[in-house]
Image (spheres, rainbow, N blue to C red):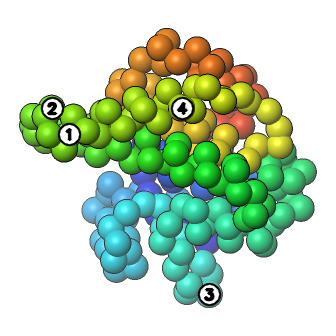
Amino acid sequence: MKLYGTTTSPYVRKIRILARAAAVPFEFVDTRTEAGGAAYARIAPAGKVPVVELPDGRVLPDSDLIASFLWTNHVDALRKAGFSLAPDAWEDRARQIVVETALDSAINRFYLRKDGVADAGYVAKQQARVETCLVWLDRQASFGTPIGHATLSLGCALDWMVFREVVDLAAYSNLSALRTAWTASGVGKGTEPG
């Protein structure tokens, strides 16, 4: 399979971690290059990463969809690697939505500020949403195995937020401890944003 994306994207990172854990070989296509960007433009009408192109030509244009595909087709390998991504794990999926809401808001604010947009109105609301979500997540954060949807997304999100310097994790003791345990576990080793 071909995985289109960037090495900085936390959503792409999630798929890199799962593909490696499932021992699924993939060709990484960096969409920041001219050739990668052109190939990506042909198959990705939504314009977001990651996108997976399967050997049979099917295209999966979303990280959650790709994770579900990997779980469905490589459940034994992923369980053995310490993951549990059952589609009916409703509480875990609900936490994942909060994690990814915080992440999407942090990404929006980061790039709008980078483009020179004032930190007011919509942009300021994005920061408030990040903080509200992180406070909520901090009350229940803990790292353990098997790793579910929420922990996988949260580990990738926190690493991105620290990498991009958009949050001070010292303000969130449980999230800080989770990130320390996540890093120590080695789950994402070799896939860090960069």
Which residue sits at x=44%, y=47%? Answer: 101
Q: CA distance from mark 2 to mark 4?
A: 23 Å
Q: Residue at x 63, y 20 (%)?
A: 174
Residue at 42% x, 32% y is 132
- Dot 2 or dot 4: first in sequence order is 2
Instruction: Give the Cα distance between marks 4 and 1.
Output: 21 Å
CA neighbours of label 3 inside 10 A, class few (<14), some (14 to 19), many (20+): few
Residue placed under numbered mark 4 in the picture: 136
Task: Please name the amino acid that badge 4 sits on.
Answer: Trp
Q: Which residue is mark 3?
A: 56
User: Hey, which quadrant is residue 77 in on the image?
Assistant: bottom right
Measured in 3D between alpha carbons, the distance from the residue under mark 3 to the one under mark 1, in whole angstroms, is 41 Å
Viewer-nearest residue: 110 or 131? 131
Q: Marks 2 and 1, how far apart in space?
A: 5 Å
Res 179 seen here: no
Q: Nearer the viewer, mark 3 or mark 2?
A: 2
Instruction: Tell me: 68 left or right of 110.
Output: right
Q: Which amino acid does the dot numbered 3 rest on? A: Asp
Q: Secondary structure at mark 3?
A: loop
What residue is shown with label 2? 119
Mark 1 — residue? 123
**Which is nearer the N-term, disc 4 or disc 1?**
1
N-terminal of the two: label 3 or label 4? 3
Q: Position of residue 26 (x, y in %)?
A: 63, 63
Using the image as rendered, state which of residue 7 and residue 101 is in the foreground.
Answer: 101
Residue at left 37%, top 63%?
A: 48
